[in-house]
DNA sequence: TATAGGGATATAG
DNA sequence: CTATATCCCTATA
């Protein structure tokens, strides 16, 4: 048997590790047995991070994974990675034996690691930036040395289960958004929709290889399509018309995607080299990032630090985000004095890609594995056929990326 | 909020 | 095309 080449190993890892229905234990065996690629695919990196997060969802290491995850290209715009990162960082600060030291290390300017991940930088928004993240970072920074503020924050963020739930939500969303593997894409090109074009462009040597992969029957089918349909003048005309109308569209619409993808690829290329040293990456990164935020924020933070605890007791943290949203309201009747250290509004994400999408995209249908089906059967046996939440919680390893509704629907299918 | 049921959509045959 | 599987939406308690 020929020796497995590194690129073959990369294809296998990309395919298997990125498959949510493969248990992490099995994926780890494969990872231990195969050489890890020098330039892993984004899909492989992403799925590795997700598996690492699932094994250890609330910790400093989880913070590393979340920050690295957010830096990967082609992010899912709907991904709750920012919320998960914020919840973990806030919990870590709240649960540390020395709140002051932890809050300073995580949230204080300029060096706080969570602060660097959410604060504005030279040359663009960090991937984890959000209005909520900035507000919370300010709150923790201001709570250093303020026992009352600390108590409030501990009440808000001190629940480990809550932070873990955020991470689990993120994992479900991310797994659902993981696309097809390189092998699946290649198979699609050779025997799927793109087959005819692929085969037509191939010479005889390459076609001989395709023939082995596709099988005789499929090969005949594809070759007959090439001869029967593709070379007719009508088809050529249709293809020509499609291409010209596409070109017309491109002339009218300025597609932001290519530039965005190019930028993302550059970031990935830079990160790839350091992929193995995630910790180093984040400790060194941003050492020279810009320090100064809007001066108003600093002033207000200073005010709170020295201010009386009672001012914080008045403040309803739940209402904070609403106030923040309303701050664009020209009404302005609300008293400013009751809003400690609200930062001035910063840039809001206005990507045309997101604006156009008012509805979340339908998840790619993922077939249920036999392991999942068996787990569901056992779960129903144990908890009954209307306790989907219990079944899901007690088998979160098997049901990666599945919701209680998915479980219910699947059971409906299995029992009819 | 969790679940049940109807419906939309993708995929297999 | 039909049948089936998966996913989404919404009423209800």
Image (cartoon, coloured by chain):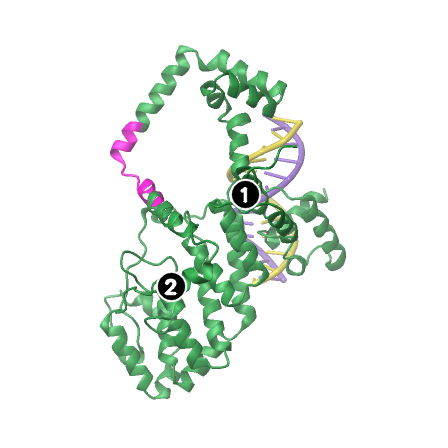
Chain colours: A green, B yellow, C purple
Query: In the image, which disc is placed on residue A134?
Result: none
Camera-side residue of A382 and A91 = A91
**As displayed, is residue A4 above or below residue A138?**
above
Image location of residue A121, percent across then percent down = 29, 61
**As displayed, is residue A178 above or below residue A50?**
above
Which residue is rendered at x = 28% and y = 63% of the image?
Answer: A346
Quadrant for the C terminus of chain A, please: top right
Camera-side residue of A124 and A170 = A124
The numbered mark, 2 or 1, whose residue comes first in the sequence reads 1
Give the quadrant of residue A287: bottom left
Give the quadrant of residue A184: top right
Q: Which chain carries label 2?
A: A
Quadrant for the N terminus of chain A, please: top right
Q: Quick check: is A260 in the magenta stretch?
A: yes
Location of mark 1 (residue): A14
Magenta residues (range): A247-261
Same subunit under labels 2 and 1?
yes
Image location of residue A116, percent across then percent down = 36, 65
Magenta portion: prevailing SS class: helix
Residue A346 in sight here: yes
Which residue is rendered at x = 32% and y = 71% of the image?
Answer: A110
Which residue is rendered at x = 27% and y = 36% of the image?
Answer: A253
Q: Quick check: is A288 in the magenta stretch?
A: no
Classify 10 Å Cα crowding around label 1: few (below 14), some (14-19), many (20 and above). Answer: many
Which residue is rendered at x = 33% and y = 70% of the image?
Answer: A323
Location of mark 2 (residue): A284
Q: Mark 1 lies on which chain?
A: A
**As displayed, is residue A186 above or below residue A83?**
above
Image location of residue A74, percent across then percent down = 41, 47
Image location of residue A196, percent across then percent down = 49, 21
């Amino acid at each position: 048997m020929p020796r497995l080449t590194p690129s073959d190993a990369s294809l296998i890892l990309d395919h298997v590790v990125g498959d949510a229905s493969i248990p992490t234990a099995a994926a780890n065996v494969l990872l231990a047995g195969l050489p890890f690629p020098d330039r892993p695919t984004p899909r492989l990196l992403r799925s590795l991070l997700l598996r690492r997060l699932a094994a250890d969802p609330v910790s400093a290491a989880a913070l590393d994974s979340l920050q690295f995850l957010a830096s990967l290209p082609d992010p899912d715009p709907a991904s709750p990675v920012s919320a998960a990162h914020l919840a973990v960082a806030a919990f870590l600060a709240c649960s540390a034996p020395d709140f002051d030291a932890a809050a300073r290390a995580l949230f204080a300017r300029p060096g706080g690691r969570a602060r660097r991940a959410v604060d504005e930088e030279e040359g663009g928004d960090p991937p984890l930036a959000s209005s909520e993240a900035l507000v919370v970072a300010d709150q923790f920074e201001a709570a250093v040395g303020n026992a009352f503020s600390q108590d409030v924050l501990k009440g808000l963020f001190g629940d480990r289960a809550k932070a873990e739930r955020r991470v689990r939500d993120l994992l479900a969303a991310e797994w659902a958004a993981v696309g097809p593997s390189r092998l699946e894409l290649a198979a699609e090109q050779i025997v799927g929709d793109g087959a005819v074009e692929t085969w037509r462009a191939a010479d005889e040597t390459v076609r001989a290889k395709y023939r082995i992969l596709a099988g005789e029957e499929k090969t005949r089918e594809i070759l007959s399509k090439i001869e029967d349909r593709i070379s007719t003048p009508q088809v050529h005309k249709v293809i020509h018309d499609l291409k010209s109308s596409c070109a017309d569209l491109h002339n009218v619409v300025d597609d932001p995607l290519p530039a965005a993808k190019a930028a993302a690829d550059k970031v990935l290329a830079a990160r790839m080299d350091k992929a193995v040293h995630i910790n180093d990456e984040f400790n060194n990164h941003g050492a020279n990032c810009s320090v100064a935020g809007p001066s108003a924020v600093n002033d207000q933070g200073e005010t709170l630090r020295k201010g009386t605890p009672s001012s914080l007791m008045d403040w309803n943290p739940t209402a904070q985000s609403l106030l923040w949203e309303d701050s664009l309201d020209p009404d302005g009747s609300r008293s400013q004095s009751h809003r400690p250290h609200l930062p001035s509004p910063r840039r809001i994400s206005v990507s045309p890609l997101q604006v156009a999408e008012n509805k979340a995209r339908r998840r790619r249908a993922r077939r249920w594995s036999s392991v999942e089906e068996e787990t569901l059967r056992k779960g129903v046996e144990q908890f009954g056929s209307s306790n989907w939440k219990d079944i899901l919680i007690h088998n979160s390893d098997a049901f990666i990326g599945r919701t209680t509704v998915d479980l219910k629907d699947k059971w409906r299918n299995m029992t009819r």
